[in-house]
Image (cartoon, rainbow, N blue to C red):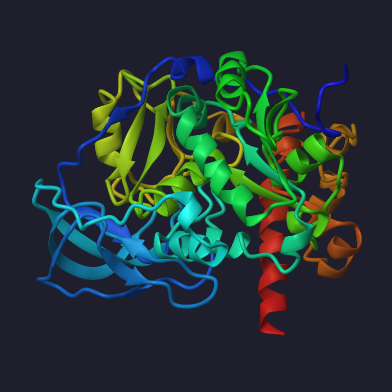
Amino acid sequence: MAKLTFKGGVHPFDGKAISKEKAIRELVPQGDIVIPLSQHIGAPASPLVKKGDRVLVGQLIGEAAGFISANVHSSVSGTVKNIETRRLANGGKSSCIVIENDNLYEEVEFEKKSLDELSTDEIRERVKAAGVVGMGGAGFPTNVKLTPKNADEIEFIIVNGAECEPYLTSDYRRMLEEPEKLKQGLFVVLKLFPKAVGYVAIEDNKPEAIRVMTEALKGCERMEVKAVKTKYPQGGERTLVYATTGRAINSDMLPADVGCIVHNVDTIVSIYNAVILGMPLMRRIVTVTGEAVCEPQNFYVRIGTSYRELLEAAGGLKKESAKFISGGPMMGFAMMTLDVPVTKGTSSLLVLEKDDVRENEESPCIRCGRCTQVCPGRVMPAKLSTLASTGNKEAFVKFGGMECCECGCCSFICPAKKPLTQTIKSMRKQILEDRKKK
């Protein structure tokens, strides 16, 4: 039987053996907690507290400031030290609420509900109130994604358990250790879309996760596991929709336009926590890994914890490191400092002993066409990179530059070691900014 997949893609070293057998461990933060008011796509949340206020675990401290925005909650109890601008892992800056942790972890009261007693509007409202956003990296407010214009036409709810990004194993551990929460979260979403079926898509290099989730979903109507081919970027939204349903989308479309909604594993569990347990999004699983880490590990981490504490909890460095990356090596970003907070979108801290990108010497393009062969967007990265370098925006768009999903396949495969993805990404950003101004 043909394996579910897409055209293009690459097979980088996956590095998952370093941490995949390590059970999730709770990380109790020791220092101040720094909670950014911007942890999502859209408008930053508006602060609801001031310096000197005492806050509790789960307390709303930042209110969504628009339709595309998300609530922010305290992950610890303690005193607000200040509201100030801090740098984030991606190099940008955000207004942040700095909380002096009192280590008491006193909580607000969470209102539990059964799914049967909730209407669809109440479900969406509880997701919104909990500040749930996409936790696969994009950070799109989940309540908005769960409210498409064509709700009656949604046929597939796809849970992204592919985890194709090298080194990351947090979703894998979540599926092994908490399959029931994932199942219950999928039940919640399926209640919103009665015509839909739920697919849990898992790459076939994770047979234990496939086995565990298949057993968990046994006897559940409208739910099944889909084993997809192991290939990067199988977990990309466009590629996963195509692999599991055969439906294609482009940069001008959303999955909902072809009857699909895609959610990350951690997002689905957060939906369960919000709707059934009444718990806001205050923590997530983060993989701390890489050849330079003493004790690679998956941690339950409270939002606002410092990356430096993450590394210390994993035993620190066992050898000199060449690069720190937030996320994976394909789509993550190099970090200037570890003194930045974990956010809702933080998936991993990767510590590499060798910086291949810096050590590689760029040479002229030999027109081999490999970048075109592996591109899941079916564009010509080398040509787009040249157009981007010369500032030719009109031709860049004409030749499909906006169809790039910034996966990094072209840069990975390029024998000339040209930074194709980075060049294309910069031009796409300029064009999107130009469109916003119009």
**Picture coordinates of residue 171 (x, y %)?**
51, 31
**Picture coordinates of residue 312 (x, y %)?**
24, 31
Relative to 434, is 315 above or below? above
Front in this rendered view, residue 186 or 248: 186
Residue 363, can we see it?
yes
Q: Is residue 158 left or right of residue 77?
A: right
Residue 345, can we see it?
no
Front in this rendered view, residue 102 or 246: 246
Q: Is residue 330 left or right of residue 39?
A: right
Q: Quadrant of residue 412?
A: top right
Front in this rendered view, residue 158 or 396: 158
Q: Is residue 245 left or right of residue 12?
A: right
Q: Residue at x 33, y 51 (%)?
A: 282
Q: Residue at x 35, y 48 (%)?
A: 342
**Picture coordinates of residue 392 (x, y %)?**
83, 66
Q: Residue at x 29, y 66 (%)?
A: 60
